[in-house]
Image (spheres, coloured by chain):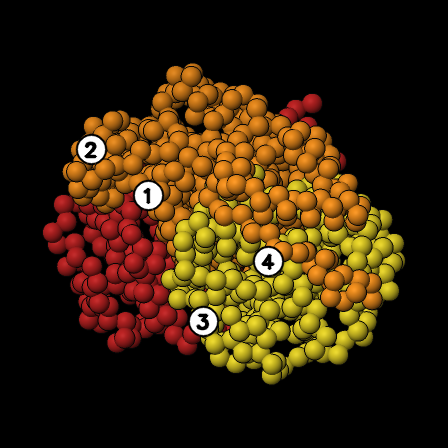
């Protein structure tokens, strides 16, 4: 008998009395009027950095300004030009010298100020953890209310790798571990020519004035 | 920076482990208390986590409902664990994951060794996994020539210090910064006088990063396994699990069979509860879902039993398998905070340890369920509503029945039981003892044999008992 | 209403004034209070250490003494918790189940059954730190534990609020266990004493003059620590205050 069979047999012999799986509600009752505003507020409450919005004609100007003095930029999104072609990377550790990585998140979560970075966003998954600094572009129209809504999203079912990136409460002593790059989030929708090949449509351009971020750190 | 002339308190070490002999937690706790700087910091750090947890709890109106849901989801899953294990395996395999099954710790270690050897991997980086501690994986691999590097800061400190982790979430919480500085100075060659935490963390990061970049394999644990998607979920604050899994081309996951949850909608409940309970933050900085190998890589999952299937059949104790290893019970436990996690002498300490350790070895851990005041705070903070303090009580009965308690204690309890069943005898004994207490000199009462009197005054016996008073003033029977 | 007065063993032996205050307090409400003289102990000390069979004799004696009362009332949260929740060393006959369900701790009896809302004879012009034993707090539901998300209430605080001049002060750790824990206080002495010392210190920091509790067992332990530490604080059982003691 294989270990698999032994274990399954032992489990079956010892199963507790059957009981039902409860239905998990969505807990939508405290859904805020503006998810984008709630997201930015949650993020900033936790000491997060939101880049100031650019002008409607050049929304990514602040991002490019942020990158001006970078030693090495690697971009996983066509909106920003980088110095490495991620499609050609075979060994992730060749990205160890990346100073700034730029990626576009799949979506954000207002409850926790989190962004979801999936393999299609990162191109090389380890990029988000090897780069010294991470700049995340986030469509204000792609923000869900809470984690219940987040876990209903297709990325969590379909992608081979996906990760929520979040921040801890402000005031907690920051410990810098090997995978903790500095991070900034730029809240702006993708431009028309950057529409994803998966057919997701452009959301309404929705940069509101109160999203003018403060650079906190 | 530590002041150069400040006296440094040596770090108290953990319980003395001698083969299978019962661990003496009280002896180790006493040594921890004899290091007041360590004890005070430990107590305050963890109490602060408990307060942060409370603060998060008050922000979530549905908090108690979430706990109930989490408990019900886990109980359902455990009641159909065989089906969920098979579903997980099938979905993981469909995603290109290789799934292994290990009956016990030895088999787990051998499977991991075989995977590494078949790829010629001599260097392994890993993120924190209590299961790998439980199995003694690091010792096993080191003995067969594999270089293992812990990437979690707290685990790395403990690894370098050749000491077990003391807490499931913050492994080095018992150490003062001077202790950490000394460890790094001795093992990495940093400045022993610079104990600034940011500096120490940077030192560790710089020392570990090259090892991460050239490691042949990476290993992670699993906070959750999702049956519906075949996903392995890992929550960290440092991203070290992601580095361990995504940089080398070989990713191995160690997971206990009880880590299953049915689907993503269930997972959401646990992700909302886990870090709020553990650290008082809404979520960890990285919550990662691994469903398959990275491009150009390989992914293995080792499902481990090691006594879990047996515990599933214990009517009074199977719900301890709901545990999501958040450590909230440790943070709230007043005994744990004053004893230090190493005083329990085993992988799982604190309240959850008291109820699962006897299943690993009834003899070795037979004293642990008595290291509790049964106050019940642990039960109230447990996100999956394990009735921890009631299981501690139940274990005491089991251990007494199995003659696993000291002879002297059993003799005293027997005598007390007989005395308290006989009113006349009891009355005589009480009156006699009170007379004795009132007249014996201090040195007879307060000496090494009288444990009560080591740090406390004994109660002064009154002039008469209630019984005597009643008889005298109310004329006896009414 | 015929009430059986349950005087726990350690109160009989060490704190008879608590038993006296309980008796007198109940009599103030015109209840018919009976003290069965052959009672000894509820069995808790043995049972809490896992020695269930050794608790059987005491439990059987308890049942024998307390048959036929409307309520059995005792000034000890831990003992009443044992009777209501753990009293299983004896066969669970209908009579045993009846007695178990009718056993009440003093504060909950006054608050829930008598629903007393005034103590005109009581006056206690002092700063008081209220200590709820963990058994009373979490098992009998005397108050909302600080780790639970629920609206706040406290039966003992409600009763004490009716005592003229009494001011409640709260320590920074409102309900951390004091470390008595029965035999824990002896077999795990160093941790127990540290917990007791910390507990007393918390009340001293809050400027309490008295520590007041519905459990003398906890207070016996805390007082022992306080005396050893020379802490400037006094102790009183809630029964004594509600019965009119002035400190």
The residue nearer to you, when weighing B345 against C96, is: C96
Helix or strand or loop: what does disc 1 sit on? helix
Number of the label disc, if any, that sits on residue C216? 4
Q: Which residue is mark 2?
A: B192
In the rendered image, residues at marks 1 and 2 fall on the same chain? yes
The circle drawn on residue C27 is none
Tell us which disc is closer to us: 4 or 1. Answer: 4
Closer to the N terminus: mark 1 or mark 2?
1
Numbered tag placed on residue C127 in the rendering = 3
Tell me if residue B475 comes above or below residue B119 in the rendering. Answer: below
From the image, state whether disc 3 or disc 1 is nearer to you: 3
The N terminus of chain C lies in quadrant:
bottom right
Give the residue number, with chain letter if any, for mark 1. B37
Between B254 and C239, which is closer to the camera in this rendering? C239
Shown colour of chain C: yellow
Q: Which chain is home to disc 4?
A: C
Q: CA distance from mark 3 to mark 4?
A: 19 Å
- Residue plotted at (57% across, 28% down): B22
Chain A, chosen colour in render: red
Question: Crowdedness of circle 2 by 10 Å Cα count: few (<14), some, many (20+)?
Answer: some
Residue in the image at 41% along x and 60% along y: C232
Q: Chain of mark 1?
A: B
Secondary-structure class at tag 3: strand
For the residue pair B94 and A8, the one nearer the viewer reads as A8
- The CA span between labels 2 and 3 is 49 Å
Q: Position of residue B182 (x, y in %)?
A: 25, 32
Question: Considering the numbered disc 2 on the image, is that residue within a helix, a strand or a loop?
Answer: loop
Chain ID at mark 2: B
Q: Chain B rendered in what hue?
A: orange
Marks 3 and 1 close (CB-CB < 8 Å): no
């Amino acid at each position: 008998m294989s270990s698999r069979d032994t274990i399954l047999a032992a489990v079956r012999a010892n199963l507790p009395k059957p009981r039902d799986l409860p239905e998990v509600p969505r807990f939508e009752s405290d859904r805020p009027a503006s998810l984008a505003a709630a997201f930015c507020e949650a993020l900033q409450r936790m000491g997060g950095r939101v880049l100031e919005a650019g002008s409607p004609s050049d929304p990514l100007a602040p991002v490019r300004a942020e990158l001006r003095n970078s030693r090495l930029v690697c971009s996983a999104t066509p909106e920003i030009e980088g110095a490495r072609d991620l499609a050609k990377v075979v060994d992730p550790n060749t990205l160890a010298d990346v100073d700034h990585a730029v990626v576009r998140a799949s979506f954000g979560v207002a409850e926790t100020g989190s962004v979801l970075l999936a393999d299609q966003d990162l191109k090389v998954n380890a990029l988000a953890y090897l780069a010294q600094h991470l700049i995340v572009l986030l469509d204000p129209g792609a923000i869900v209310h809470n984690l219940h809504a987040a876990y209903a999203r297709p990325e969590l079912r379909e992608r081979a790798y996906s990760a929520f990136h979040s921040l801890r409460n402000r005031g907690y002593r920051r410990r810098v571990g090997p995978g903790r790059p500095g991070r900034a989030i730029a809240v702006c929708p993708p431009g028309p020519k950057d529409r994803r090949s998966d057919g997701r449509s452009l959301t309404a351009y929705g940069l509101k004035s109160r999203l003018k971020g403060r650079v906190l750190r | 920076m530590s002041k150069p002339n400040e006296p440094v308190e040596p770090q108290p070490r953990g319980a003395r482990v001698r083969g299978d002999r019962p661990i003496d937690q009280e002896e180790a706790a006493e040594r921890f208390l004899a290091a007041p700087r360590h004890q005070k910091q430990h107590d305050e750090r963890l109490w602060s986590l408990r307060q942060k947890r409370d603060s998060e709890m008050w922000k979530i109106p549905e908090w108690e409902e979430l706990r109930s849901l989490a408990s019900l989801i886990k109980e359902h899953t455990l009641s159909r664990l065989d089906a969920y294990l098979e579903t997980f395996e099938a979905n993981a395999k469909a995603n290109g994951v290789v799934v292994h099954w290990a009956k016990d710790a030895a088999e787990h270690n051998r499977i991991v060794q075989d995977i590494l050897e078949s790829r010629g991997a001599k260097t392994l980086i890993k993120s924190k996994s209590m299961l790998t501690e439980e199995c003694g994986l690091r010792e096993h691999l080191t003995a067969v020539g594999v270089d293992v590097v812990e990437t979690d800061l707290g685990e790395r400190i403990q690894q370098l210090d050749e000491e077990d982790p003391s807490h499931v979430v913050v492994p080095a919480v018992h150490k003062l910064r001077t202790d950490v500085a000394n460890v790094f100075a001795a093992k990495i060659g940093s400045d022993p006088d610079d104990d600034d935490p940011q500096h120490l963390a940077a030192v560790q990061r710089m020392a570990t990063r090259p090892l991460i970049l050239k490691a042949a394999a990476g290993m992670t644990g699993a906070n959750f396994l999702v049956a519906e998607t075949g996903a392995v979920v890992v929550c960290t604050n440092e991203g070290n699990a992601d580095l361990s899994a995504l940089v080398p081309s070989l990713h191995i996951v160690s997971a206990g069979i009880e880590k299953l949850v049915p689907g993503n909608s269930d997972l959401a409940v646990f992700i909302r509860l886990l870090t709020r309970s553990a650290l008082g933050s809404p979520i960890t900085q990285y919550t990662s879902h691994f469903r398959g190998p990275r491009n150009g890589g390989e992914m293995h999952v080792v499902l481990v039993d090691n006594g879990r299937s047996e515990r599933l059949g214990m009517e009074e104790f199977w719900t301890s398998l709901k545990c999501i290893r958040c450590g909230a019970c440790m943070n709230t436990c007043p005994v744990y905070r004053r004893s230090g996690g190493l005083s329990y002498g085993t992988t799982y300490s604190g309240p959850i340890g008291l109820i699962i350790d006897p299943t690993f070895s009834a003899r070795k851990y037979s004293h642990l369920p008595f290291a509790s005041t049964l106050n019940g705070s642990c039960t109230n903070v447990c996100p999956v509503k394990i009735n921890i303090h009631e299981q501690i009580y139940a274990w005491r009965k089991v251990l007494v029945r199995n003659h696993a308690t000291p002879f002297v204690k059993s003799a005293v309890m027997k005598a007390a039981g007989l005395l308290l069943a006989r009113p006349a005898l009891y009355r005589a004994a009480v009156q006699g003892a009170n007379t004795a207490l009132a007249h014996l000199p201090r040195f007879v009462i307060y000496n090494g044999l009288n444990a009560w009197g080591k740090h406390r005054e004994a109660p002064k016996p009154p002039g008469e008992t209630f019984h005597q008073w009643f008889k005298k003033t109310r004329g006896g029977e009414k | 209403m015929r009430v059986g007065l349950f005087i726990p063993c350690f109160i009989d032996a060490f704190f008879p004034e608590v038993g006296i205050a309980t008796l007198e307090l109940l009599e103030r409400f015109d209840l018919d209070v009976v003290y069965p003289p052959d009672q000894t102990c509820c069995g808790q000390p043995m049972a809490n250490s896992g020695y269930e069979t050794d608790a059987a004799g005491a439990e059987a004696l308890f049942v024998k003494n307390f048959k036929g009362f409307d309520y059995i009332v005792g000034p000890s949260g831990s003992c009443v918790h044992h009777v209501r929740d753990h009293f299983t060393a004896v066969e669970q006959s209908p009579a045993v189940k009846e007695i178990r369900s009718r056993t009440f701790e003093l504060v909950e009896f006054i608050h829930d059954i008598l629903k007393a809302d005034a103590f005109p004879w009581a006056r206690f012009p002092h700063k008081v730190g209220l200590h709820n034993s963990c058994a009373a707090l979490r098992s009998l539901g005397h108050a909302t534990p600080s780790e639970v998300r629920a609206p706040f209430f406290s039966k003992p605080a409600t009763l004490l609020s009716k005592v003229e001049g009494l001011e409640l002060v709260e320590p920074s750790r409102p309900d951390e266990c004091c470390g008595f824990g029965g035999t824990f206080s002896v077999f795990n002495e160093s941790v127990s004493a540290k917990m007791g010392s910390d507990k007393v210190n918390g009340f001293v920091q809050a400027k309490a003059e008295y520590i007041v509790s519905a459990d003398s067992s906890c207070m016996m332990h805390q007082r022992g620590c306080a005396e050893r530490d020379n802490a400037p604080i006094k102790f009183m059982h809630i029964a004594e205050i509600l019965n009119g003691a002035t400190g």
